[in-house]
Image: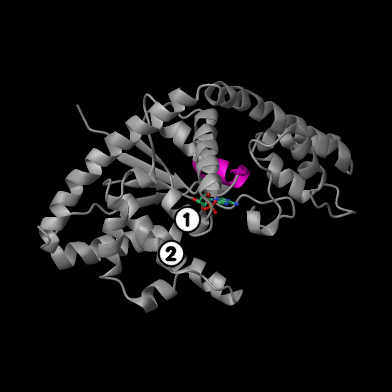
């Protein structure tokens, strides 16, 4: 039997996922869970760079696990785990820190963006591409679904794997990003990339009231017959063929078009909410899913680290 390639994805538990996270990354996990040996990680070590309150971290982590289960991740097929269940991720990140130069990390977009905003960033944020490289390489993951903003970090991961392989011996598989062109940058309510920091998001598991508020706030350009930003979000939910006739019929009627989009979003998330609520009512089941995912992922990582430690000369 042919062994399946490993696909890995991680999202930080720093708040509710939005449509950008869902369509660019989370949806791919559900679509591909039968085709790849799929590892889904709640990136809690990464979240520590910004979430620095224990209770909040626990709550956000639990909520994100429910979100994954709600969208249709099948825990009998997918290895769902907390990053912190595998301290070896941070150990490997340290090895990578030691073969990586500061100027190289200073070229990372995320660092440059923060610097441009004059933000004081912590060392965790600066080193984040190395921990991300460790997350991927420790599991021999080959396919990494991401949005376009993460492309550079996958390049960093490949560079780091090559550097380590050349320095110590061939141990890491070079991964590839999986970017779906039509959703590589999902736009928000103001037409810019949907992002929490722009305040233009529509959260996937928001209430009807919250979704209504967000949809009604979509910026429209008075005078245009087609409200471009409404249309671009609507494209996520319907084929362009369907939309063309709807937008033709409702030309210039922005409110009607927003209401049509709203109805489509709510119809889309309703079954996910129901699935999420079923898991939310069974906290013991959720805990056992995370535990068995963590055990499986850790066993794999520990095996890999035995080889890595030998190559480095620590064993
Ligand atoms: P973040 O929450 O920014 O850490 O993003 C988690 C994942 O979602 C990353 O793979 C991002 O590339 C992806 N992502 C975030 N926002 C968007 C967006 N507006 N369009 C496409 N992908 C996105």
239 sits left or right of 14 in the view = right
Q: Is residue 111 placed above or below 211 in the rendered structure? A: below
Element marked by disc 2:
helix
Instruction: Please tell me the numbered disc located at residue 48.
Output: 1
Measured in 3D between alpha carbons, the distance from the residue under mark 2 to the one under mark 1, in whole angstroms, is 8 Å
Q: Whole-percent x and y of residue 61?
A: 50, 41
| Residue beneath the point at 58% across and 73% down | 119
Q: Is residue 290 placed above or below 133 in the rendered structure? A: above
192, 16: nearer the viewer? 16
181 sits left or right of 45 in the view = right
> Residue 260, located in which quarter of the rendered image?
top right
Q: Whole-percent x and y of residue 252?
A: 89, 44
> Residue 168, located in which quarter of the rendered image?
bottom left
At label 1, counting other C-alpha atoms closer than 10 Å, the crowd grade (few under 14, some 14-19, many 20 or more) is some
What kind of secondary structure does the magenta stretch mostly adopt?
helix
| Residue beneath the point at 35% across and 51% down | 176
Instruction: Please tell me the numbered disc located at residue 214.
Output: none
Residue 202 sits inside the magenta stretch? no
Element marked by disc 1:
loop
- The residue where tag 2 is placed is 124
The reply to whether the C-beta atoms of the residues labelled 2 and 1 are less than 8 Å apart is yes
- The mark nearer the N terminus, 2 or 1, is 1
| Residue beneath the point at 55% across and 26% down | 280
Residue 175 is at least partly visible in this image: no
| Quadrant of the frame with the N terminus | top left
| Quadrant of the frame with the C terminus | bottom left
Query: Magenta span covers which residues?
Result: 16-25
């Amino acid at each position: 039997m042919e062994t399946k390639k490993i696909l890995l994805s991680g999202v930080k538990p720093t708040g509710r996922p939005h449509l950008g996270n869902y369509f660019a990354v989370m949806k791919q996990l559900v679509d591909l869970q039968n085709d790849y040996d799929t590892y889904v990680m709640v990136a809690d070590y990464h979240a520590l760079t910004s979430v620095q309150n224990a209770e909040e971290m626990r709550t956000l982590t639990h909520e994100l696990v429910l979100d994954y289960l709600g969208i249709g991740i099948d825990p009998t097929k997918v290895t769902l785990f907390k990053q912190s269940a595998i301290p070896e991720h941070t150990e490997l990140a340290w090895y990578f820190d030691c073969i990586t130069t500061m100027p190289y990390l200073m070229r990372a977009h995320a660092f440059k963006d923060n610097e441009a905003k004059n933000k004081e960033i912590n060392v965790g944020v600066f080193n984040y591409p190395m921990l991300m490289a460790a997350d991927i390489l420790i599991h021999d993951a080959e396919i990494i679904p991401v949005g376009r903003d993460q492309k550079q970090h996958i390049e960093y991961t490949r560079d780091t794997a090559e550097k380590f392989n050349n320095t110590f011996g061939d141990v890491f598989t070079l991964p590839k990003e999986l970017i779906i062109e039509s959703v590589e940058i999902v736009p928000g309510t103001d037409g810019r990339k949907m992002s929490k920091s722009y305040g233009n998001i529509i959260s996937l598991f928001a209430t009807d009231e919250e979704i209504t508020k967000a949809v009604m706030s979509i910026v429209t350009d008075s005078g245009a017959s087609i409200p471009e930003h409404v249309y671009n979000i609507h494209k996520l939910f319907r084929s362009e063929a369907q939309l063309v006739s709807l937008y033709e019929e409702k030309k210039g009627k922005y409110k009607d078009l927003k209401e049509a989009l709203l109805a489509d979003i709510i119809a889309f998330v309703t079954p996910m909410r129901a699935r999420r609520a079923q898991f939310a009512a069974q906290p013991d089941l959720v805990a056992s899913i995370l535990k068995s995912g963590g055990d499986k992922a850790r066993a794999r990582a520990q095996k890999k680290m035995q080889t890595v430690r030998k190559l480095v000369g620590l064993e």
